[in-house]
Amino acid sequence: MGDYIIDGGFKSYTEFMYKLVLPVFTVTIFLFFGIILFTKLPFFAPYIVLFIGVMFITFYPYIIFEQRKIKMHEAIHLFITYAGTLSTLKINRTMLFKKIAEEKEYGELAIFANRIVYLSKSWNLGYAKTCRKMSVLSPSKIFADFLDRLAAVLDFGEDLEVFLTEEQDAVLDDFSNEYNKSMQNIRMLQDVFISLTISIAFAMAAALLLPLLMGISIIVIVQYSLVGLLLMDLMLILLIKGFIPSDKICHNLKILDTGTQKVIKSFLIIMPISFLITSTLLFINIFPFLFNLAIGFTPLIIVGILGTREENEVSKRDKAFPTFIRAVGGAISTRGGGVTNSLGALRVHHFGVLNKMLINLQTPKSWQ
């Protein structure tokens, strides 16, 4: 538990108690007694709040630790490829790690590279000893093993270019195994989600008899069932975000007129409108409860249409990419390594949905 607390950003148990445990526990206790004294919620509602507060305190350090590991796994393949490319320039060790530390998109890996440079130069520990010490602190076993092997290479004075070229295959194999493991976890979560959804639907069907047996309104049953479905969906999203490496299908470059930006902007505009319509209908309460929800959430169909259209475009680009990359490789090989000239020569060919992106690669004005 101590390692998880330190990796969670807390310097000691005392700081963990003052900055997390005490505030969260205080808020939980206030909510617990507030629900009991000032609301008419069911008797189990305050105990659910208390349970959530205790679980949050218990698992927060572990969740932070896992998120750091996941972020490292997401960028490990980019990191090792970039490091291997830099090694071909015959630069020294300090410059190698500094260049990696400047790439902020590598996240935790860039932070580790920056720490390695700092400890090696400012504390005179040497790169080999520093890599061994940092490997112990790494949340990712893949990156820790890489640092151990790198430390051994630095001790024996092996050529970094040869080592990093070989390491690309080893690290990418580990990354592939981790990715396949994540896919299996997603399938398992999918099965769990389907099973829970069917269970809640069956419980709702059985609960239709409760108004006859206990005099409970069916609207109340539906409301609690919807809350249960919502909590289940949120829990599934948190599990996927917190414990499974993501696979980005869209870049984060600032390019004009991208489909992803349209989806995000439409969601940010339509979601408040939908929430306002739903709240107004529930407050007026002219129509039945489910009918009010249906009317309120109907505008979100626009976001769904835009998102589906963008997903189809991504699928088309994936299918066209193998042909494009083979053509790029052939053109570069023919022209002796000139990437820009090779891309210019490829513009005479038609690559379908990739044509616009090919033009963007050669047109700086399309970038911001």
Image: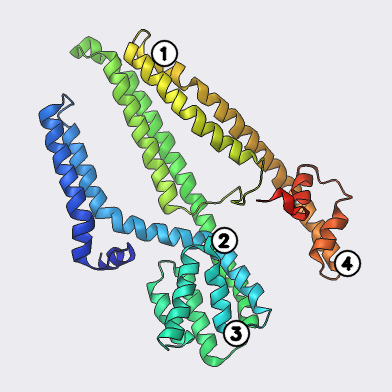
Crowding at dot 3, Cα within 10 Å, few <14 / some 14-19 / many 20+, comes out as few
Point out the tag, 4 or 3, that comes first from the N-terminus. Answer: 3
Q: Quadrant of residue 188?
A: top left
| Pointer 3 or 2: first along the chain | 3
Q: SS of the residue at dot 4? A: helix
Looking at the rendered image, the disc whose residue lies closer to the viewer, 3 or 1, is 3
Say if 262 sits above or below 210 in the image.
below
Answer with the quarter of the image where residue 159 lies: bottom right
Disc 1 to disc 4: CB gap under 8 Å: no
Identity, as a three-letter code, of the amino acid under mark 4: Thr
Residue 31: horizontal and vertical position, in percent? 17, 38
Q: Amino acid at mark 1?
A: Phe
The one of 114 and 63 positioned closer to us in this rendering: 114
Real-space Cα separation, disc 1 to disc 4, in angstroms: 65 Å
Can I make out residue 113 in this image?
yes
CA separation, marks 4 and 3? 32 Å
| Residue at 42%, 89% in the rendered image | 124
User: What residue sits right under mark 4 in the picture?
Assistant: 334
Q: Residue at x 26, y 49 (%)?
A: 56
Q: Position of residue 101 (x, y in %)?
A: 52, 71
Q: Which residue is mark 1?
A: 291
Across and down, in percent, residue 57 comes to 23, 52
